Image (spheres, rainbow, N blue to C red):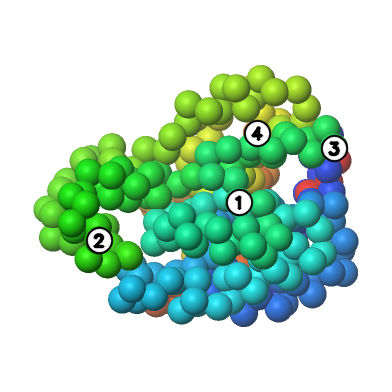
Amino acid sequence: MTESFYTIPGAPHLALLSDLHNRDYKPAIKSVQRRKPGIICVTGDIIYGSAPEGDVSPLVAQPNALALLRACAAIAPTYVSLGNHEWMLDQQDLVSMRATGAVVLDNSWEERDGLVIGGLTSGYVMRQRRRLADMPAEELAKRRYHDRGGIASMLKTPAELLLERVPDDDWLIPFAATPGYHILLSHHPEYRRLVPKGIELMLSGHTHGGQWRFFGRGAYAPGQGVWPKLTKGVYDGRLVVSAGLSNTAPVPRFFNPTEVVYVRG
């Protein structure tokens, strides 16, 4: 694991963690303890998997997720947004996340010492919530967790699935209008197109650095495809993308170590 340091005028001293996917969190925590940021921002995908394990909470089955949040909250104020793998979590799980001392920003924001910190929830999460809202009550009562639609989803075209996975961005306008320095946690860097100009800093992950990096460029990223543009580093002076804390692909990361990112003004 490496540490990356970026300077953005006006930004507070913060740590950016992303894409733990239930892997070992201790190296990241040792780094944060040493660097002592003023706030810690976790941009989603603290868990991993394509479906919940039976009716057991993913946060129980994958204990490193909550352990990371507890450890972060013990160091500095910690803010969390929801990534695509958090589609598996329900409202009880979000309560468990908040019980660690971390602030879960679920299409919401909080103000702190002149900062306005918001979290844009992944469109994958919103798709699952819409699906559950349309499900008959008797079906919902059978079990706590439900998959993403099974064979019905597999039969849909990529374009249809893309339209279903849109985030809820209506709140970004009042968020950007709130006085202060704005920090937006958004797991997906490709959501940059949705972000109003009044938001000074956007923090993201999701790309795992492009998995393989050649000449400073990633080879592939979900949501962006082959030779993606937004995989690691600073873009347009206000988007910071973390290469993440884990590897979940069947192939190794190449010229692309995991990282903790630090930003300061």
Which quadrant would the N terminus be assigned to in this image?
bottom right
Could you tell whether 182 is left or right of 56 in the image? right
The disc at residue 236 is 4
The disc at residue 141 is 2
Could you tell whether 264 is left or right of 161 in the image? right
| Residue 215 image offset from top left, x and y in percent | 59, 57
Asked whether residue 144 is in view, the answer is: yes
Q: Secondary structure at mark 4?
A: loop
The disc at residue 19 is none
In-front residue for pair 199/6: 199
Q: Residues within 10 Å of mark 1 (few under 14, many from 20)?
A: many
| Residue 36 image offset from top left, x and y in percent | 87, 61
Discs 2/1, front? 2
Examine the rendered structure and indicate whether residue 263 appears above or below residue 92. above
Could you tell whether 246 is left or right of 10 in the image? left
Could you tell whether 82 is left or right of 125 in the image? right
Residue at x 66% of width, y 70% of height: 68
In-front residue for pair 30/242: 30
Real-space CA distance between mark 2 and mark 4, rounded to the nearest whole angstrom: 47 Å
Q: Secondary structure at mark 3?
A: loop
In-front residue for pair 21/257: 21
Quarter location, residue 178: top right
3 and 2 marks in contact (CB < 8 Å): no
Q: Secondary structure at mark 2?
A: helix
Which quadrant would the C terminus be assigned to in this image?
top right
Instruction: Give amino acid for label 2.
Output: Ala
The disc at residue 113 is 3
Instruction: Give amino acid for label 4.
Output: Asp
| Residue 242 image offset from top left, x and y in percent | 62, 55
Real-space CA distance between mark 2 and mark 1, rounded to the nearest whole angstrom: 26 Å
Discs 4/3, front? 3
